[in-house]
Amino acid sequence: MTSVTPWLRRVLIGLPFLWLAVFFLLPLLIVAGISVAQSEDAIPPFAPLLRATAAGLESHVTLANYRELAHGCLVVYGSSLGNAALATLICLVIGYPVAFAIARAPGMWRHILLFLVMLPFWTSFLIRVYAWIALLQPSGLINRLLLGAGLVEEPLPLLYNAFSVQLGLVYSYLPFMILPLYGSLTRLDESLLDAASDLGARPWRVFVAVILPLTLPGVAAGMLLVFIPAVGEFVIPDLLGGPDTLMIGRLVWQEFFENVDWPAASAIAVALVAVLTAPLLLAQRFLAREGTA
Amino acid sequence: MALLEIVAASKSFATTEAVYQVSLSVERGEFFALLGPSGCGKTTLLRLIAGFETLDTGRIVIDGDDMTEVPPYARPVNMMFQSYALFPHLDVAGNVAFGLKQEGMERRRRDARVAEMLALVQMSDFSRRRPHELSGGQKQRVALARALAKMPKLLLLDEPLAALDRKLREETRLELTGIQERVGTTFVVVTHDQEEALGMASRIAVMNRGRLVQTGSPADIYERPNSRFVADFVGAVNLFEGALDASGLAIPDADRPIPLPGALRVSPGMRVALALRPEKLSLSPEHPAGFALAATVQSIGYQGGQSTVHLATASGLRLRAHLPSHAAQGLARGAAVWASWAPADAVVLTE
Amino acid sequence: MTGGRGGAGFRLGALALGFGFLYLPIAVLVAYSFNNSRLVTIWGGFSTRWYGALIENEKFLAAALTSLEIGIMAASLALVLGTCAGLAMNRFTRFRGRLLFGFMLMAPLVVPEIILGLALLLLFVAAQSWVGWPAGRGMLTVTIAHATVGACFVAVLVRAQLAGFDRSLDEAALDLGARPFAVLWQITLPEISPALISGWLLAFTLSLDDLVIASFVSGPAATTLPMAVYSSVRVGVTPEINALATLFLATVSALVALAFWVMARQERRRVRAG
Ligand SMILES: Nc1ncnc2c1ncn2[C@@H]1O[C@H](COP(=O)(O)OP(=O)(O)OP(=O)(O)O)[C@@H](O)[C@H]1O
Ligand SMILES: [Mg+2]
């Protein structure tokens, strides 16, 4: 805008720019730096990268953290990605019909249903995850119903395993799938569907040949919005997972708080960012497009 | 037997009766136009035929088969949409092939048919383009090719020319009739443009407020409208209102009754309107033989070959006359003239 | 629309299952908050004793106050930063570092919280040893962290609203002799006020809801409500948490419903005026 005085322009750009540079970019660089430091029993618990000694500057840069990570943690990355991918798929399968039904609901209902999708998102995430514990535990509601109905002999092991983690992920991230899908479904031109069925496409074919291809941007956006946070999730595997549940978020937490190994935690974090770079870049493109559309 | 038979079809939405008790039949090979003002239910009737809306009452029969309960994808009918509704994710060839794929037609025959259709609408060079890379006229052709590709028994066209600019509209109208003659498919076209309907259809049905008011050939509709609405909606018209007496229609502007066309069996005293097309009026400075009305020239609108002369009688009745421009040149604003016509050219309207 | 397309029955079923899944745990939580029994799994009759116990629980009360204070400060800070950023991205189509700026505004939305928390903590530790600020960690550091994330959300909302905003209003005001700052204050900001309100609320709830980042950057002096809940949940299920959750849910629903209502009313007024 040509009409803005230079100082106003400088404030509008400079203030958030500096803030983000200091409180977002710089911290990431520090993480990268510490990830190549040596762990040390000190405060803070790592050796400086460069140390002045009698013999001059001495470098303490090491790739040991990464080597260790490549040794022991690959399986954790694998299972994190796998869990997140599975949760994303399940969210898509559940979320698409729901988004479709909301998009086709009559006027007033559409707003109410949309509101109901968003409402859980505005309430405590932690508490919603915790609610599943009461439902899933051996003496929980679900097991008692199953026992009562005589469907099972003894309580099913529903909690603290891969199942409950998956359930928690799907449950928590489902709204993130529904919202972009709903957006792209409402943008769909109704007459295209009429045209397809006029040309002989049965309902199922209309879906596969017209609706699905035209809502792919929404599908992609939803998948990214679920997948990315799910990979780095901490609360869900921590509360609902068992001792054998491997997720990166939990690993970072353990290294940091329990083992007090800051360099190792940093290395894991850097590797996580590296793993997520491709989907993050994709997501940025999609979000940017949705934002300007 | 008629190809399309609509029997007492009605459809209402929450508060509007969009289509009410419409019955009509369309013969094989006809170019049939549904004409009416905006909101009169034309699109709704078309959508009922295609199967997108379900009838409240009545029946729709196509080629002897009752279609009332048949879903749109199973009807031997295709539609060209007002907005064209081209699939944005498919190229031109993909759009045209869409219906054939649903039929499961094998690849080679399908490609051949697509090529044939694109040649028919002169779009062969554009087969790899996406809809957003086409102009309005090109989209229209692709939509036509797509709707024709399945060789439907009946092709429905909703305002096929509305989105085109005036010049293109006229060219396309000619092409459309040409294509219809070549493929021989029965066309049902919706339009609110009377000129368009008169120019391309072999038969016209005029609708008003969900009801069918008149069906007939373009000449029928134009020359012998059966109601004030049709006379007024289809082309310009001069209306004289008054009461009948033994010798003709008495109106306050004339010293004697207007003579009626032919022998009419109407009861004296009945209130009717007499409709007269502007081009049937002739103007002369002297009182001609027979009946004539005295009027003064209000203004002259030049339209190229033809001019419209607006007249007013002493009591303020307004008339318009279409004259060849060279004939109108002799008239000046304010000039006193006599307007006359052959009695047989006027139409008596009782509704 | 075609009557049967997508099957009305199918759609109703999808809605019932989808929303059943989303609301089952919440419903159970609310129901058990009125349970007289200490065992979360057995129904011991209706009672409000856990609400009483909750109010007397000083740990939760203090944590709730801390969270509220942090939330209000962080959301307000995020509102200022995010509005500036949104305006800057919308109004200035070219300046040096715009690409980097856009990246920094988007990335915090998608980078896992655990990384944000770790990174910010390492920053605060380093900053303390380099420049002596911030001295120790607590409410201030949590507020800074939450404001950073919140600002990015506010910026997204502001940009979306500005994208649909008629620039000629601005220009008309400038044409009538208003100074740029006055235009911003009197025309632009009121026009995007729905985004500002929802942006603030979003930043506030995010702050109120955050466990991971706060656990990293907070110190012993400041325990937020999610941190308190987390430590008691780790120990085992307690009915007080159900009561807390119910209160939370009621408050948030009321607030969100209010926000919707206000927005709908504004919309209607605008429609009537335009
Ligand atoms: N889905 C619908 N729901 C409610 N009312 C409708 C619906 N479709 C059409 N109508 C109403 O039915 C009437 C006829 O509409 P229709 O679209 O058939 O008119 P039309 O003759 O095609 O008009 P136009 O020339 O403007 O396209 C209108 O009053 C319209 O408002
Ligand atoms: Mg129409």
Image (cartoon, coloured by chain):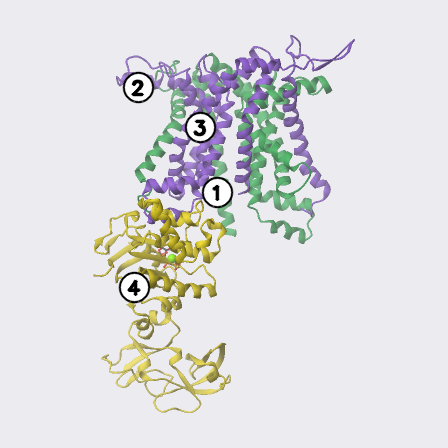
Query: What kind of element bears circle 3?
Result: helix
* Residue neighbourhood size for the residue with mark 2, other residues' Cα within 10 Å, grouped as few (<14), some (14–19), many (≥20): some
| Amino acid at dot 4 | Glu
In front of the other: label 3 or label 4? 4
Residue A59 visible from this viewpoint = yes
Of all chains, the one bearing label 1 is C
| Residue at mark 1 shares a chain with residue at mark 3 | no
In which chain is the residue bearing label 3? A
Label 1 with label 3: CB-CB less than 8 Å: no
Q: Mark 4 points at which residue?
A: B30
Colour yellow, chain: B
Residue occupying image coordinates x 43% and y 60%: B162
Residue type (three-letter) at the residue carrying disc 3: Thr
Position in image of residue A135 (x %, y %): 38, 19
Mark toward the start of the polypeptide (2 vs 3): 3
The C terminus of chain B appears in which quarter of the rendering?
Answer: bottom left
Q: What residue type is labelled 1?
A: Ala
Tag 1 and tag 4, C-beta contact below 8 Å = no
